[in-house]
Image: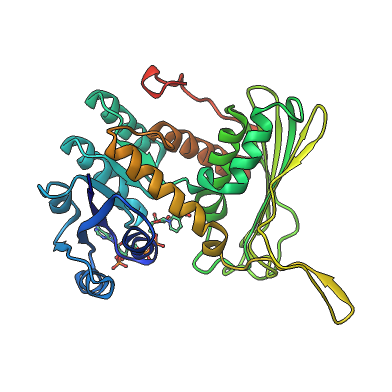
Amino acid sequence: MTLKIGVIGTGAIGKDHIRRIRRNLTGARIVAVTDVNAEQAHGVVQGEGIEARVYDTGLDLINAPEVDAIIVASWGPTHEEFVLAAIAAGKPVLCEKPLAVTAEGCRRIVDAEIAAGRSLVQVGFMRRYDRSYRQLKKVLTDGAIGAPLTLNCAHRAPEAPGFSGDMALTDSCVHEYDVLRWLLDDDYVSAQVIMPRSCHLGEQEGYQDPHVILLRTRQGVHISIESFVNCQYGYDIQCHVTGEKGIASLPEPASVHLRLEAKSSDGILVDWKDRFVDAFDVEFQEWINATARGEMDGPSAWDGYVVALTADACVKAKYSGLIEPISLPECPAFYGR
Ligand code: NAP
């Protein structure tokens, strides 16, 4: 069976997903696209040489009879409406982060999915599909280093064009919040945000970068995340877990080691897309496969909701200077945790 997919949003990442489904993946084809910029949508259809109908609106695409499943890759504030419409239409949907721009919006999606009685929603937290994170998770799950005690992580990007306000906490660090609770199979109970001396390369007066985010989990694991989105030198994702018996570190992306001109060096990636290109491919192939089987086994709407609550707590902690509690409601049995 070939899964017939409709894509909402043909901007940067929507275009990438269309290309990867067309060129790299199996079991699916793009049959419909839409974007508020119709010219861009037509351009992507032509450029990729796909036979896809261009719809006027996301709602038209969701309800189109030829569309089996939906990818939401439009602007964040549109996600909630499109995901709710997909649930109402009974169609599986993979929504890029954020699931919704508020925790209340995420909760509405959770409630709608439970009311529909079918798992339909997956959130685009692609780090769970990254080979190195999966290797690290296996080491932790196998108990090789004993119980995890502390995690020291870094999310560093060379620059963050368009970033303002608290986007480091609410936009890029959402990947950390998701992948770390998945790695540990645990949930957060509190957040604190430390603001060190700020670099002078942010876009606005008073812009804070880096942030240090301290999270504590239910099992008492202490997590420290350095978020530094104007670090200049490269795109560098680090995660080191100290356990009772040893330390497990996220493998570095492979690069040719050079001994050259009196130096010994390894390359560091610069673009986040290069770091996670394979993870996106695996994420979408696994979603296609599961959807074709009538299943949904990736990051759920509940995970999207928990991440939104965590981001809210981090923003609150940044301004209060306090350790802020993260009070998660009981996970509904529907989500099986
Ligand atoms: P983008 O380049 O701005 O693309 C978004 C597209 O959606 C634009 O073409 C935009 O049109 C269109 N759009 C806005 N409202 C729409 C509507 N109501 N119906 C249909 N199309 C609409 O942004 P992007 O970088 O691709 O990001 C898209 C989403 O993916 C964001 O939520 C972002 O957070 C997420 N993302 C996730 C990752 C990841 O690591 N998983 C990475 C990058 C992005 P206009 O430009 O004309 O407004």
- x and y percent of residue 83 in the render? 27, 42
Identify the residue at image location x=19%, y=69%: 38
- x and y percent of residue 104 in the render? 37, 35
In terms of depth relative to the viewer, which is nearer, 91 or 218?
91
**260 left or right of 112 in image:** right
The image quadrant of residue 35 is bottom left
In terms of depth relative to the viewer, which is nearer, 151 or 284?
284
In terms of depth relative to the viewer, which is nearer, 25 or 155?
25
**151 left or right of 61 in image:** right
- x and y percent of residue 78 in the render? 29, 51
Residue 219 in view of the camera: yes
Identify the residue at image location x=40%, y=24%: 335
Q: Residue furthest right?
A: 262
For ligand 1, give the image quadrant. Answer: bottom left
**109 left or right of 39 in image:** right
- x and y percent of residue 124 in the render? 42, 47
**164 left or right of 298 in image:** right
Q: Is residue 332 above or below residue 77?
A: above
Identify the residue at image location x=56%, y=34%: 182
Residue 316 in view of the camera: no
